Image: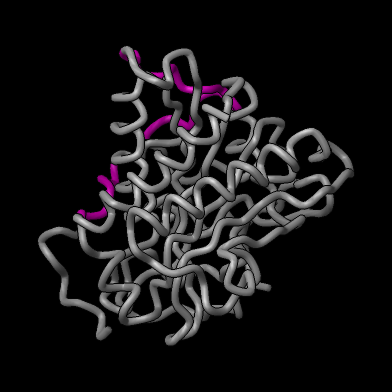
């Protein structure tokens, strides 16, 4: 396995158009020319890291079916990570071992970065959840020089006392490997990690997210991981191992596959992706 908390090797630079070396994924079209719907990378002005593990103040929420609920949204990676290799490569303790603080993530062949994708979907997801009354906490908003580390991502959700958390990613598998998958926490215990209390609720959250993602986006479950279920269970991800609240990762598609890349770079499809994830979270929180 390569690198960081999503099982993908980091690319050389998050905004480079040359493909990075990718290991076979063990998590969860011709590439379109840069489309107007693809958002530009986050601004590069560095900002203060802030207190470690502090939960950002959630934006005010209105009335709706999720009123009183707190949802933590974790945009995978950070567009600035490539500028801070020493910081993101340092090892952090995930309870069952050590991993890099964070990675750069992957990108499409046309250079659309996973970090840009994940932040864009996170913003769309936040808007939908807030319209339903939820308080939404982002682990970062493209406003940090790098990271946060995978350990801090978990800690932010824990300190926010979230009712559910979703980490948003896109995979970097081989061309021809298509579809999405949702990663569930395995039952692990070691150091600061003890997932026993969250395994079952996270499994339910993942199933609801996967089902609604299919329904809204029309995307099929992964054809290369999860045996057609769209679900995968892992015990090597710090963001899951260290979480004390129900949490899943979603790999929304494979950025290295031409057909998936055409979807991931399309703003209308990203809105559907956010809608599917939001519907899954809503179903879970309503039991």
- Residue 50 image point, x, y percent: 49, 25
The residue positioned farthest toward the right in the image shown? 190
Question: Image point 61% across, 40% down: which residue?
Answer: 247
- Say which residue appears at 26% left-offset and 49% top-offset: 271
* Residue 66 visible from this viewpoint: yes
Q: Magenta span has 200?
A: no
Residue found at x 53% / y 78%: 223
Rendered position, 75 above or below 30:
above
Comparing 157 with 191, the one in front is 157
Q: Is residue 175 left or right of residue 64?
A: right
What range of the chain is rendered magenta? 39-62
Picture coordinates of residue 29, whole percent (x, y): 27, 84
Residue 164 in which image quadrant: top right
Tell which of 218 and 70 is nearer to you: 218
**Residue 90 percent coordinates (x, y):** 66, 53
Instruction: Tell which of 99 and 182 is nearer to you.
Output: 182
């Amino acid at each position: 396995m390569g690198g960081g908390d999503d099982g993908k090797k980091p690319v050389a630079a998050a905004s480079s158009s040359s493909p990075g070396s990718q290991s076979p994924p063990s998590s969860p079209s011709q590439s379109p020319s840069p489309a107007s719907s693809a958002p530009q990378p986050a601004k590069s002005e560095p900002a203060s890291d802030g207190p470690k593990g502090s939960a950002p103040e959630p934006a005010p929420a209105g009335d709706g079916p999720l009123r009183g609920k707190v949802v933590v949204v974790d945009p995978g990676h950070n567009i600035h990570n490539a500028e801070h290799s020493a910081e993101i490569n340092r090892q952090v303790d995930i309870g069952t071992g050590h991993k890099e603080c964070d990675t750069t993530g992957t990108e499409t062949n046309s250079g659309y970065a996973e970090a840009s994708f994940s932040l864009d979907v996170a913003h769309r997801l936040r808007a939908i959840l807030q319209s339903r009354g939820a308080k939404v906490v982002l682990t970062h908003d493209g406003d940090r020089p790098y990271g946060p580390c995978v350990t801090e991502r978990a800690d932010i959700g824990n300190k926010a006392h979230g009712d559910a958390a979703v980490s948003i990613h896109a995979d970097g598998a081989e061309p021809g490997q298509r579809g999405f998958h949702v990663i569930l926490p395995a039952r692990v215990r070691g150091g600061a990690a003890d997932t026993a209390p969250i395994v079952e609720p996270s499994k339910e959250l993942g199933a609801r997210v996967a089902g609604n993602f299919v329904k809204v986006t029309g995307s099929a479950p992964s054809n290369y991981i999860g045996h057609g279920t769209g679900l995968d269970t892992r015990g090597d991800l710090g963001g899951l191992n260290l979480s004390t609240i129900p949490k899943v990762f979603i790999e929304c598609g494979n950025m290295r596959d031409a057909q998936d890349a055409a979807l991931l770079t399309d703003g209308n499809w990203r809105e559907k992706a956010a809608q599917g994830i939001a519907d899954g979270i809503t179903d879970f929180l309503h039991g």
